[in-house]
Amino acid sequence: MVQQVTEGVSITVETYYQPAQSNPLSSEYLFAYRITIENLGTMPVKLLSRHWYITDSNGSHREVEGEGVIGQQPVIDPGESYQYVSAVNLRSEMGKMYGTYKMENLYNKKLLIVGIPEFQLIAPFKMN
């Protein structure tokens, strides 16, 4: 598990290899990740968009951008948190991801760029 705090917003990431949805013989590896976003500040924030950087150990790089997360643009009040689970396909058994969320302070309309810490995606059989 990794964590990063930016602009009073804490991002925690946990990852899980999904063997039942992976096919190593075809170089398809699915990883799920759980993100917890906690508002440590004093103003409500709204998550507007995400920007991911994804790297496989075979050297391929991708960027993914879009509105919200899992089809939602949650508002997170002070002291509250929001959690979601998503997944990513890799073409190798190891990789990494990191990125940013664009959020808005709902009181003063200030835009915040909140860092998502880099996290490793490693199939358990590669750890031996």
Image: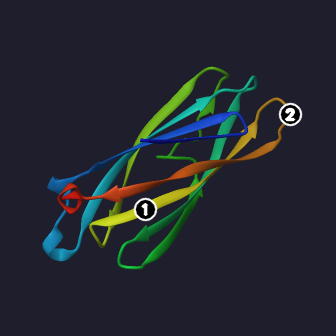
Q: Give residue 3's mark.
A: none
In terms of secondary structure, where does tag 2 sit?
Answer: loop
The relative height of residue 18 versus residue 91 in the rendered view (above or below) is: above
Q: Left or right of 103: which side holds 50?
A: left
Q: Give residue 96's mark.
A: 1
The relative height of residue 72 versus residue 126 in the rendered view (above or below) is: above
Q: Left or right of 117: which side holds 42?
A: right
- Rendered-image quadrant of the C terminus: bottom left
Residue 25 at x, y = what percent?
A: 13, 74
Is label 1 in contact with label 2 (beta carbons under 8 Å)?
no
Amino acid type, label 2: Asn
Q: Identify the residue at image location x=78%, y=45%.
A: 111
Nearer to us in this view, 21 or 116: 116
For this orientation, the residue located farthest to the right is 108
For this orientation, the residue located farthest to the top is 79
Q: Identify the residue at image location x=47%, y=34%.
A: 83
Amino acid type, label 1: Lys
Residue 119 at x, y = what percent?
A: 45, 53
**Distance between the alpha carbons at the discs numbered 1 and 2:** 34 Å
Q: Give residue 108's mark.
A: 2
